[in-house]
Image (cartoon, rainbow, N blue to C red):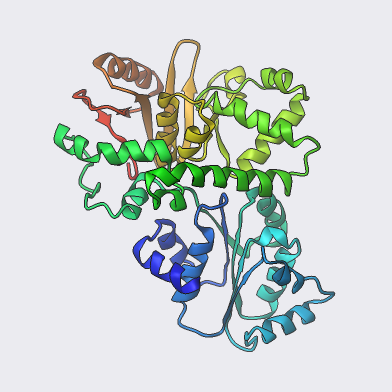
Amino acid sequence: MISLCKVVFMIYKRQLFKEIKGFQESKDIIVITGMRRVGKTTLLNYFYQGLNTQNKIFLDLEDVLNQSLFKVNSYSEIALVFKKKGLDLNRKGYVFLDEIQFVKNIPSVAKYFYDHYKIKFYLTGSASFYLKNLFSESLAGRKKLFELFPLNFNEFLTFKQSKYSISKFKEKVSKYSFDVFKPLVDEYLEWGGMPGVVLLSNNRKEDRLRDVFTSYFQKEVKDLGDFRKNQQVENLIMLLSKRVGQKLDISRFSKELQVSRPTVYEYLNFLEKTYFISLVSAYGDNSISVRKQKKVYLIDCGFHKILGVASSGSAFEGAVYRQLRKQGEVNYFASKNQEIDFILKKKEKIFAFEVKETATEGDLKKLSQICKKLRIRNYYLVSRNFSEVEKTKYIFQLNNI
């Protein structure tokens, strides 16, 4: 399996690889989180295979037998386990642990060996909800946290082995160039960017997506959520999927689910921290009532397909958000009569993006007026369909604004 993962990643490298490589020579504990089936295990195998040393071990902690290795009474016993697995603790070594949420004492184990040996840890886990709470205290100053998401459109093209490059499309796009990318954009918007789904033929994608959702609900919601009524969480997921791109009404959710407002917030926090949804806050000096409301987006386009409730427009808006989120802080703007879908803060610059099925001159005029009041100089329309309107961009232009 490891050799297979190595071959795959020689072809399909993720953009996060470059960021992680910058910390390979440091002592920092590398922690990689993300939703299930997003590619964490194959990423871990890529770095494991790439190390030019035999002083390394790889353990899958979803395996019950590997979990039992850490159910001992002292760190010295764990040291013996590492030695039996072939790790020489007297020199620099590497420990790769996959799916660490199944072993609750891993943070303390990593901390001990970080402090007493020249051991570098690479750790992955699906539940950010679990990982961030424990690691924020036990590994403070010792870790570097990375989040792996479904493929952005640039990565999608790599996985599809597309001969087309998006790097040259920073300015105006011709109708011909737009038409070249349109079938790929349509596929991405329909089926999303889960790596295992992208690599399948279209007639097999839906079954795989359903399997991903089922795995998430079983392993994260049921096993890690520890909620009294899992059905309420499932009902909330369905309610959220109908309101993608909309401001959330917590009181309404409370009534529909017949639970308290604090419980709704608890569910939302869990769904966000386990990477099923993203919540986007309001920008700037909006009123208090608006600032408290967040917009919701699903983590991947493909879930729109299997949940079958979101409009194509909201699915497209969610895809745009996913292209922007890695570049900086993303918010939305709303006042009584004016809205902007996304405000991106990237380093010292601020960008505004209004998402449309087909951009028009009227859309640009309205956006320009709002941005003038907000003193935002960089603003664009993002159109799903081709448009001749100035300042129009397309999804394949958004990976590096």
Q: Residue furthest top?
A: 337
**Which residue occupies the foreground of this view, 241 or 48?**
241
Say whether residue 320 is left or right of residue 83. left
**Which residue occupies the foreground of this view, 6 or 337?**
6
Query: Residue 60: x and y, percent?
Result: 63, 68
Say whether residue 116 is left or right of residue 9. right
Query: Residue 159: x and y, percent?
Result: 35, 54
Q: Residue furthest front?
A: 203
User: In percent of the image, x 52 and y 33: which residue is there?
Assistant: 297
User: In percent of the image, x 68 and y 81: which residue is there?
Assistant: 82
Image: 74 above or below 156 = below
Q: Residue furthest right?
A: 73
Image: 344 above or below 111 = above
Image: 247 above or below 106 = above
All told, the count of numbered labels is: 0
Say whether residue 142 is left or right of residue 13. right
**Which residue occupies the foreground of this view, 212 or 350?**
212
**Which residue occupies the foreground of this view, 217 or 121?**
217
Q: Quadrant of residue 186?
A: top left
Q: Quadrant of residue 281?
A: top right
Query: Residue 285: x and y, percent?
Result: 52, 23
Q: Is residue 24 visible?
A: no
Say whether residue 328 is left or right of residue 96. left
Image: 70 above or below 258 = below
Q: Quadrant of the C terminus?
A: top left
Q: Is residue 284 visible?
A: yes
User: In percent of the image, x 37 and y 40: which residue is there?
Assistant: 188
Q: Quadrant of residue 311?
A: top left
Query: Residue 56: x and y, percent?
Result: 57, 80
